[in-house]
Amino acid sequence: MTVIKVENLTKVFKKQLRRNFIKSFLFPKYENFTAVDNVSFEIEKGETFGLLGPNGAGKTTTIQMLCGLEHQTSGNIYINDLNINSEKNFRNISEKFNVLFSDKLLFNRLSAFDNLEFYGNLYSVEDPKERAEELLELVDLVSWRDQYVESFSLGMRMKLALARALVNNPEILYLDEPTLGLDVKNAEFVRDFLQNLNCTILLTTHYLNEAIRLCDRIGILQKGKLIHIGTPEYLKKKEANTRTFIINTNDNQAVKQILMKNSLIVKIVEKSSKLEIHTKNIENYFDILNEISQFKLSEIQESKTGLEGLFFDVHDESTESDNKNIDKTEPKSLGEMI
Amino acid sequence: MRKSKRIIVRTLAFAKREFKLKTRYKWPFLSTTIIMPIIHALPFIILYWGLLIGSSGDLSEITAENYLAWVLLGSIIYSTYSLGYMVFRLNFWSEKFWMTIHGTLIAPASKYYLLFGTIIQLLIQGLLSSLIFFIIAFVSFPTSFINIFFVLIIFVVALIAGAGLSLINGTFLLINENLVPFFDFFLYGLTFLSCYAIPYELYPSFLQVAVKFNPLYHIINITREVWFNNYSIEILWSFLYILAFCVISVMLGIYFFNKYTRRFGVHGY
């Protein structure tokens, strides 16, 4: 059963052009900035769907539109087959979802208990006081019950934010970068916690491993476009097959020219006078090194591909598919491409 | 949960939250609640005391007997109205930068709960500040308890009317701060034409016409007229006028808040 259906969602912001004070005051000029560009996806009941993308990819804007906090420029959002653009529908739906933003939605000048009790009342929870106690125990913050949130560490705030998001026992949970800025221990706590939740989850993150571990399906957002939707297994395979290495030679430009012709190389980025080479489907980089044996190599290091390399790789495939005239409006399934 | 209980619970949740947030730091709360209204009223008390005590003449409706109550009642209503008028502007300003306003916007609660919850909190705060003024006014110019009861009703109406307009002000603070100064100018205009510290007769005739359209003038005027027992048919018309103004400002406030925050989103972080 489809719980969330997003159809051709687009959000265009007006961005003021940088001009001097007088000009910007008297004759302001704007240009359009497309934060989310024709994004479509569906999420089934009980599924954890991840939106993976770098900063500025449009993840938070997408969640804000799903929550009704931003009005979309075009497209439709259906939750349980109800279009959330209607005020009446939105009021019915808003009882069923909750959200965790990276900015937490917590009142720093209230205690942990007061925060949860307030939101419990707002969502008409049967016994808000009892629910608040229950949630504090769940996130291991009982001993901090009456302390002002302003005295909390980032990890504790995130735990409390998570408890807040669960206050109405939501059917749908939107999580916007739930482990952002957390140390390893707290991030693990949050991930373990999320794995045990029993609801439909839309999660945004820019941590590849987190997405792979928590999500049933993952959509990759880049510059507002959903370039792929696929399973974590596919991304795992991609990550395993994709390598990145950094080299420094006596003539980087010439090396770049030669390597650009190699079909196994997805992208070459010049970074502080070195070349960062993103490759796909190679066992090791010796094959590539043979091609540039005439140059003097002063440095070489292999690095984990990470998200950036994976984007280059996936984006490259996406562009190739586009060139073969595959329908551009629908995101391509990564599963089909394996 | 039954619907009526749900309404009460949610409204009180907002009231409780606002009160706890306001009293997180006690001294600023006490200062704005008790000391500031006294500071506002004091110059006019001194002025009219200097003008009227020992002098044989009256200053329009102000006499040596009623000047203290006249100034204090005007100050109470003006302070209450401006407390209401500024409340969402100040609350949303804080919430915008605490990044908590989204929690209220996405919650299933109707925005009437937010408005009336905040009004309940303001009522407690306003009564705390007005209590001293009411006592001094009563001692200096005693009146009947029915009159006091009626004045308290006007006090509540003033608060609701101010808070309704404040919700429009707060909405524009969330979506476009460029428009916020215009609400300040509007309050300055209302204050200037309210007769809260200067009698109506002292205004030039062309401004007296504008004064008659000012709802704040009517709120202050009927408070004094009731306290001084000067009942007339004009009071009834004034009361109906401010009641209509109160209802319209609340409905407009909710309409703007619902429509524009969802349409334009929260901007300015």
Image (spheres, coloured by chain):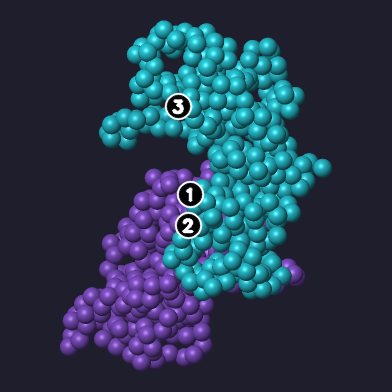
Circles 1 and 3 on the same subunit: yes
Q: Is residue B170 left or right of residue A174?
A: left
Q: Is residue B59 left or right of residue B259?
A: left
The residue at 75%/70% (across/down) is B2
Which is nearer the eye, B260 or B159?
Answer: B260
The local secondary structure at tag 1 comes to loop
Q: Colour of chain A?
A: cyan
Circles 1 and 2 on the same subunit: yes
Amino acid carrying mark 1 in the image: Gly
Q: Callout 2: residue from which chain?
A: A
Residue B207 at x, y percent in the picture: 32, 59
Which of the 4 image quarters holds residue B51?
bottom left
Q: Which residue is mark 1?
A: A181
Residue depth check, mark 1 versus mark 3: number of the one nearer the observer: 3
Q: Does the CB distance between marks 1 and 2 fall below 8 Å?
A: yes
The local secondary structure at tag 3 comes to strand
Q: Earlier in the sequence, mark 1 or mark 2?
A: 2
Which is nearer the eye, A290 or B23?
Answer: A290
Residue A51 at x, y percent in the picture: 62, 38
Q: Which residue is mark 3?
A: A301
Q: Which chain is purple?
A: B
Work out how far the residue at label 2 is from the one at label 3, CA to CA, in angstroms. 34 Å
Q: Callout 1: residue from which chain?
A: A
Q: Is residue B168 visible?
A: no
Work out how far the residue at label 1 is from the one at label 2, CA to CA, in angstroms. 8 Å
Q: Which residue is mark 2?
A: A154
User: Above or below — where is B259 with respect to B94?
Assistant: above
Q: Earlier in the sequence, mark 2 or mark 3?
A: 2
User: Above or below — where is B120 with respect to B141?
Assistant: above
